[in-house]
Amino acid sequence: MDRRQTVLLTEMDPGDISRIIEMAWEDRTPFEAIASQFGLRQADVIILMRQQLSSAAFIAWRKRTRGQHTKHQALRSQAVSRHCSSYQHKQYRP
């Protein structure tokens, strides 16, 4: 493990690490959004995911994200916008 990888995890809040993993798994969240919010390049996200996920989960994630146009802002179609949960605009009714 090089110095960059060690510094990456030791200086991060566990809540931030959890949020980065969540954003990385989301299909519509581009790596550029992670970079702007947390300052991590795509390579840094890959390192973080490799360290935090099991081997099988990491392999599944890489297969899922490799070549996926929605994970890169410059490659995205204009039709792809931010994702809204189906529950986001519903009102709670007891």
Image (spheres, rainbow, N blue to C red):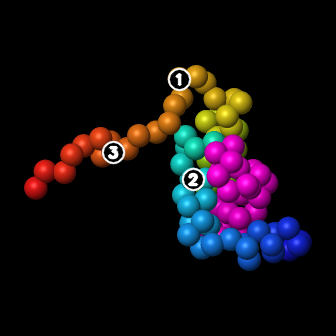
* Magenta: main secondary structure: helix
Q: Is residue 50 magenta?
A: yes
Q: Is residue 68 visible?
A: no
Which amino acid lies under the numbered mark 2 shown in the image of this protein? Answer: Met
In terms of depth relative to the viewer, which is nearer, 75 or 12?
A: 12
Tell me which numbered mark, 2 or 3, is placed earlier along the sequence: 2
Measure the C-alpha gap from mark 1 to mark 3.
Answer: 20 Å
Residue projecting furthest to the bottom: 10
Camera-nearest residue between 3 and 12: 12
Which residue lies under the disc numbered 3?
88
- Write down the region rendered in magenta: 31-59
- In the current view of this chain or complex, which residue is farthest to the right? 2
- Residue 69: percent from the left, percent from the top? 65, 34
Q: Secondary structure at mark 2?
A: helix
Q: Which callout, 1 or 3, points to the residue nearer the camera?
A: 3
Residue assigned mark 1: 79
Residue 10 left/right relative to 3: left
Query: What's the CA distance linking mark 2 and mark 1?
Result: 20 Å
Task: Return the x and y of residue 15 as percentages of the image width and height.
Answer: 56, 69
- Amino acid type assigned to the residue bearing label 1 in the image: Ala
Of 86 and 68, nearer the camera is 86
Q: Residues within 10 Å of mark 2 (few under 14, many from 20)?
A: some
The residue that mark 2 highlights is 23
The residue depicted at 64 percent of the width and 45 percent of the height is 33
x, y percentage for residue 86? 32, 42
Q: Residues within 10 Å of mark 1 (few under 14, many from 20)?
A: few
Task: Identify the element where label 3 is drawn.
Answer: loop
Q: The N terminus appears in which quarter of the rendering?
A: bottom right
* Mark 3 residue type: Gln
Identify the residue at image location x=74%, y=55%.
Answer: 40
Image quarter of residue 77: top right
